[in-house]
Image (tube, helix red, strand yellow):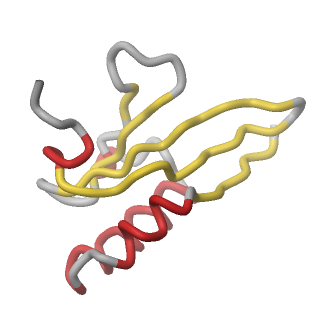
């Protein structure tokens, strides 16, 4: 199965708004996710109550939400949103 990576426009806009430190850490996390999604530092896990949304940790405060779907022989990983934990998981 081929892994495909893409991002949403919303993700791209949010990424551009990150400060320099978080931007560099996010780039590093994305590169690591592409090469080794099971790396423990990413804390890759399924989001409860969803079928195909997962999160990875950039650092202690920033998260990336990824939608994982399959189409034919491809596993499509869409970088969906990025932000602080409270941004991506608003309090109820």
Q: Name which residue lies at 74% across and 30% down.
A: 70
Q: Where residue 28 sits: x, y (%)?
A: 39, 71
Asked if one can make out residue 69 in the rendered structure from this viewpoint, the answer is yes
Count of number-bearing discs: 0
Instruction: Judge from the rendering whether residue 54 lies leftward or rightward of residue 89; answer left or right.
Output: right
Of residues 87 and 37, the one nearer the viewer is 87
Q: Where residue 41 sits: x, y (%)?
A: 28, 51
Q: Where residue 23 sits: x, y (%)?
A: 31, 77
Q: Name which residue lies at 40% across and 48% down.
A: 39
In the displayed structure, 31 sits above or below 75; it is below
Name the quadrant of the C terminus: top left
Please identify the residue farthest to the bottom as the structure is shown.
20
Please identify the residue farthest to the top as the structure is shown.
49
Asked if one can make out residue 28 in the rendered structure from this viewpoint, the answer is no
Q: Name which residue lies at 61% across and 45% down.
A: 77
Of residues 88 and 60, the one nearer the viewer is 88
Looking at the rendering, which quadrant does residue 25 occupy? bottom left
Q: Name which residue lies at 64% across and 58% down.
A: 6
Looking at the rendering, which quadrant does residue 45 occupy? top left
Q: Where residue 29 sits: x, y (%)?
A: 38, 63
Instruction: Judge from the rendering whether residue 25 lies leftward or rightward of residue 6; answer left or right.
Output: left
Name the quadrant of the N terminus: top right
């Amino acid at each position: 199965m081929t892994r495909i990576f893409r991002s949403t426009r919303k993700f791209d806009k949010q990424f551009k708004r990150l400060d320099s430190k978080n931007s560099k850490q996010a780039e590093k996390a994305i590169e690591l996710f592409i090469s080794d999604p099971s790396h423990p530092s990413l804390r890759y896990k399924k989001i409860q109550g969803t079928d195909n949304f997962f999160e990875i940790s950039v650092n202690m405060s920033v998260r990336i939400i990824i939608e994982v779907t399959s189409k034919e022989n491809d596993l499509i990983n869409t970088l969906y949103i990025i932000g602080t934990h409270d941004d991506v998981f608003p309090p109820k």
